Amino acid sequence: MKIHGSVCALVTPFASDGALDMAAYGRLLDFQIAGGTQAVVVAGSTGEAHMLEQDEYDRLLSFAVKHVAGRIPVIAGTGEAGTAKTVAATQHARALGADAALVVTPYYVRPTQEGLRRHFVEVADRGGLPVILYNVPGRTGCDLAPETTAILRDHPAIIGIKEARGDAERIQRTAELVRSDFVYLSGDDASGAEAMLAGAAGVISVVANLVPKAFRALCDAATAGDRDAVARCHAALDPLVQALNCAPNPIAVKAGLPDLGLGTAQPRLPLVELEQGPAREQLRKALSTLASLADAA
């Protein structure tokens, strides 16, 4: 299994009554595969994992595994605040057919670096799936230090890290950890190209939900080291990436779903739908511009 390139952190489409919209989910998966997405994440933070009931999580993951049918890896979000719960969730995802687990640092409880090390070792030892570490301190309240990651990468079941910090220093320090059995995947659309040029194998992306083909082109250019092509792709994508920053993820990206026939714009409380106004118009304009560029290509 090789996880690299354009990896989409899938949204979870809901119907107008708030139930899972599995038909829209199937269309979203087809849209990703047709656009060249190279792996998908089910029920991560973009998928509103913590708003899902257990049976809904099971339906989403089982459906994705069956629908994708081995064409690309299916990565399950399994991170919880407690270690025992994370181990159980990872074991469950394995039983449902996931290829790997994306395990976020425990949120809210703010463990020490030694606590993080022991947590991830326990999940890797007992979870039964290849583990991708996930560091996103802006959401969790703790930061997995590169020194701790350097220790964890020696575990045979820990295959990489999704690093969502996009500052230049963290990009460089994380890129230095890359080796044949441990990949660096950016978790930040805005700095993903910079990370790939520095040595990251790909990006676990939010914007790819809406423009998988354009995002795949960026990833191909960056992993090939083609800086001129990266500049062109980045310039085309940047207005949309910036438009998605108008509200906490996944509020804005879900606002782009209806025009693509991929579901409603509705998230679950405590998240609320993006209001009509300048932010929504900026999003529509960026999507329209990208569609025009694709048609002209």
Image: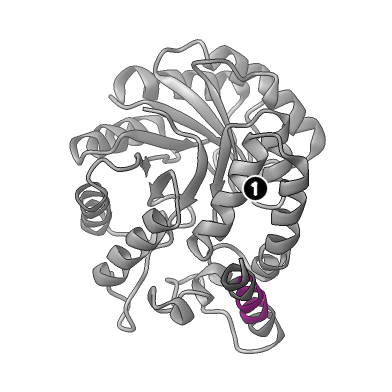
Residue on which disc 1 sits: 188
Tell me what residue is drawn at x 41 percent, y 28 percent. Answer: 131
Which is nearer the eye, 45 or 99?
Answer: 99
Q: Position of residue 238 (x, y in %)?
A: 72, 61
Quadrant of res 26:
bottom left
* Rendered-image quadrant of the C terminus: bottom right
Where is residue 11 drawn, in percent x and y? 43, 61
Secondary structure under the numbered disc 1 in the rendered image:
loop
Question: Magenta part mainly helix, strand or loop?
Answer: helix
The verdict on residue 205 being magenta is: no
Q: Tell me where residue 199 sits by quadrant.
A: top right
Q: Amino acid at mark 1?
A: Asp
* Number of numbered discs overlaid on the protein picture: 1
Identify the image quadrant of the N terminus: top left
- Name the residue rendered at 63%, 31% in the picture: 200
Q: Is residue 197 left or right of residue 5?
A: right
Q: Nearer the viewer, residue 216 or 275?
A: 216
In the rendered image, the residue lying farthest to the bottom is 276
> Local crowd at mark 1 within 10 Å, few (<14), some, or many (≥20)?
many
Where does the image place residue 268, in percent across and percent down from the top left?
Answer: 42, 71
Res. 265 in view: no
Residue in front for this viewpoint, 20 or 224: 224
Say above or below: 212 vs 88.
below
The residue range painted magenta reads 283-290
Pick the front one: 294 or 204: 294
Q: Is residue 219 visible?
A: yes
